[in-house]
């Protein structure tokens, strides 16, 4: 990884941020959206055949499909889904309890503010390079607790027209009302415009690839979306007290998501930076998905050495990472000064990988410097 001594925080931050995608495929996505809008299910089946090779007959999964999925996953996997679900539910119920309806009487004029659940939500669950049952939990559970009446899950099928069984099981356990075997821009179009098989929804949430992000951007003037999710990000603030092995492993863990992740260390210790760099170099060939790790760390990763704690905090706030781990002698002191991050994780033993699955926090977080969104499935009435 690049080891860089930072002398000017603002200049460095502006130069080091990854370039945003050009969205050169916008015209392709636009044609898909228009085709689905005009031709519905017929267009969806055409694009599923084109992109996944699957001949889809029924877009909606049947109860038999769901039952078969349960027969293909282990008891341990089901228990893991249930544990992750339970922990996130506790967090989301706590958030919901803060959102109180209020009525204010000013000079005889009563103004009420009420939180009303959205009627329908579509949750996009990626497929392809890996399976993401955890993303089902992170999108369906908040919607369910908010009181959304209809929750539809969409996920791309494989060439046999099947969705990963654990994704189906997670959707069923979390309370999804419908599960569809569709993905890509055509899935976003179906959720936004509706087809004869898939009723439209009021809001679309969940991460996806380039086509999905472009599609969400293009339909956002008619259907609400959560955010435009980019590649995953991890920033680690660490001083000389941090365990370099933990820092290195956490950077590797997050960077294996894809070949365009944005993972980095911010420190005031040159010794720590060099140790982390050596450990990553020694471990990288032993990692199963090392092609992703090598590419993303080479392209976007860095080890920044700042002059002092103040510059470390300033740089972290400038970069506003999706995940920020603080591995310092006094992490709480650092955390109180962080103003820009999707999720802050404190201490040597709180890796972002744990937050992605079982800590009870949500892993669908803002990237590309966007602020954190808390209320996704409620709206205010005045």
Image: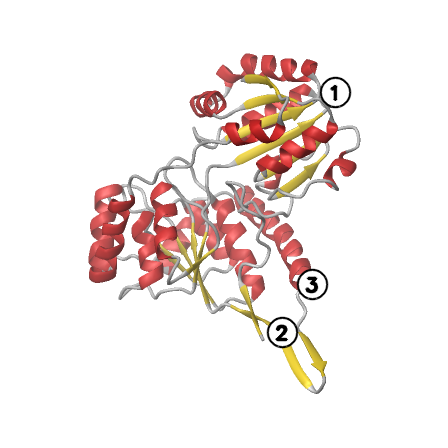
Give the residue drawn at x 31%, y 63%.
193
Q: What is the crowding at mark 1: few (fewer than 14 residues within 10 Å), some, or many (at least 20)?
A: some
**248 shown above or below 116:** above
How far apart, in angstroms, are the residues tagged by discs 2 and 3?
13 Å
| 382 and 152: which is toward the camera | 382
Q: Secondary structure at mark 1?
A: loop
The numbered mark, 3 or 1, whose residue comes first in the sequence reads 3
Give the residue drawn at x 72%, y 85%.
107
Give the residue drawn at x 50%, y 23%.
297
* Position of residue 140 measured from the top left corner of the image (x, y, whole percent): 51, 56
Say how the picture is coloured.
secondary structure
- The answer to whether residue 56 is seen in the rendering is no
How far apart, in angstroms, are the residues tagged by discs 1 and 2?
49 Å
The quadrant where residue 36 appears: bottom left
**Mark toward the viewer: 2 or 3:** 2
Q: Say left or right for 208 vs 79.
A: left
Q: Secondary structure at mark 3?
A: helix
For disc 2, the marked residue is 113
- The answer to whether residue 172 is seen in the rendering is yes
Q: What is the crowding at mark 3: few (fewer than 14 residues within 10 Å), some, or many (at least 20)?
A: few
Q: Residue most toward the bottom?
A: 108
As drawn, the label of residue 98 is 3
**349 shown above or below 196:** above
Q: Secondary structure at mark 2?
A: strand
Do the residues under discs 2 and 3 have CB atoms within 8 angstroms?
no
The numbered mark, 1 or 2, whose residue comes first in the sequence reads 2
For disc 1, the marked residue is 240
The quadrant where residue 147 appears: bottom right
């Amino acid at each position: 990884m690049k080891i860089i001594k930072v002398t000017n925080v603002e200049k460095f931050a502006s130069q080091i941020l990854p370039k945003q995608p050009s969205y050169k495929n916008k015209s392709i996505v636009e044609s898909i959206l228009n085709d689905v809008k005009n031709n519905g299910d017929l267009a969806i089946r055409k694009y599923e055949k084109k992109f996944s090779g699957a001949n889809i007959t029924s877009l909606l999964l049947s109860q038999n499909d769901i039952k078969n999925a349960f027969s293909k996953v282990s008891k341990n996997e089901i228990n893991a889904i249930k544990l992750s679900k339970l922990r996130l539910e506790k967090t989301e119920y706590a958030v919901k309890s803060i959102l109180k309806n209020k009525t204010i009487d000013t000079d005889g004029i009563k103004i009420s503010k009420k939180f009303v659940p959205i009627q329908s939500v579509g949750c996009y669950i990626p497929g392809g390079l890996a399976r993401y049952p955890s993303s089902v939990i992170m999108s369906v559970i908040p919607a369910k607790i908010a009181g959304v009446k209809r929750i539809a899950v969409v996920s791309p099928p494989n060439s046999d027209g099947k969705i990963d069984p654990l994704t189906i099981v997670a959707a069923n356990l979390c309370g999804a009302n419908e599960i569809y075997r569709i993905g890509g821009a055509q899935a976003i179009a179906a959720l936004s415009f509706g087809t004869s098989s898939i009723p439209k929804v009021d809001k679309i949430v969940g991460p996806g690839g380039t086509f999905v992000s472009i599609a969400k951007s293009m339909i956002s003037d008619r259907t609400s979306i959560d955010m435009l999710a980019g590649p995953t990000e991890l920033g680690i603030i660490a001083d000389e007290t941090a365990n370099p092995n933990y820092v290195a492993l956490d950077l590797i863990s997050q960077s294996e998501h894809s070949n365009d992740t944005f993972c980095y260390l911010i420190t005031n210790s040159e010794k720590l930076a060099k140790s982390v760099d050596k450990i990553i170099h020694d471990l990288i060939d032993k990692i199963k998905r090392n092609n992703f790790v090598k590419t993303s760390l080479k392209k976007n990763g860095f080890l920044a050495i700042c002059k002092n704690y103040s510059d470390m905090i300033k740089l972290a706030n400038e970069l506003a990472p999706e995940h920020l781990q603080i591995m310092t002698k006094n992490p709480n002191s650092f955390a109180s000064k962080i103003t820009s991050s999707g999720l802050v994780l404190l201490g040597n033993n709180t890796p972002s990988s744990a937050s992605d699955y079982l800590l009870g926090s949500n892993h669908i977080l803002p990237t590309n410097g966007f602020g954190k969104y808390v209320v996704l499935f409620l709206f205010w009435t005045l």
